[in-house]
Amino acid sequence: MKIVSVVGARPNFMKVAPLMAEMRKFPEIHSLLVHTGQHYDFEMSQVFFQDLEIPKPDIYLAVGSANHAVQTANVMIGFDKVLEDEKPDLVLVVGDVNSTLFAAAFTAA
């Protein structure tokens, strides 16, 4: 089973950490982590990956900062390509920030 988990901002990192750890226990789960890049600097992103032992993202969309509409649109465009390429069985969206709830969840639906 291929599961694509999507994170973009600090609250998402804390929520996905235990899920990623649990998925690693099951060899039949092929887990991919997509980081949208909504939070991209060390203090808002990388430090959480280190502290929470989250694996390096498999895919980094690098959307960065923008107004809500532009940021959401850029995630939707980038994540649509991920879905086309990876064809996951399940998309896991943990959170309600622009890049997860509004962009990734809508695109996956």
Image: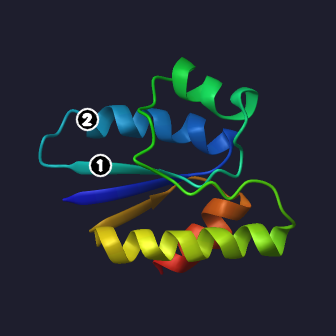
Q: Which residue is mark 2?
A: 24
Label placed on residue 31: 1
User: Which secondary structure lies at badge 2?
Assistant: loop
The three-letter amino acid code for the residue at tag 1 is: Ser
Q: Which image quarter is the N terminus in?
A: bottom left
* Residue 73 position in % (x across, y down): 69, 76
User: Residue 33 vs residue 24: left or right?
Assistant: right
Quick one: label 1 or label 2, which is nearer the N terminus? 2
- Please tell me in which quadrant of the rendered image residue 23 appears: top left
Residue 45 percent location from the top left of the image: 66, 34
Above or below for 87 versus 23: below
Question: In this image, 44 relative to 54: left or right?
Answer: right
Which residue is nearer to you in this view: 39 or 16?
Answer: 39
Residue found 72% across the figure and 63% down from its top: 98
Contact? badges 1 and 2 (CB < 8 Å): yes
Q: Residue furthest right?
A: 67
Q: Which mark is residue 108?
A: none
Front-most of residues 37 and 102:
37
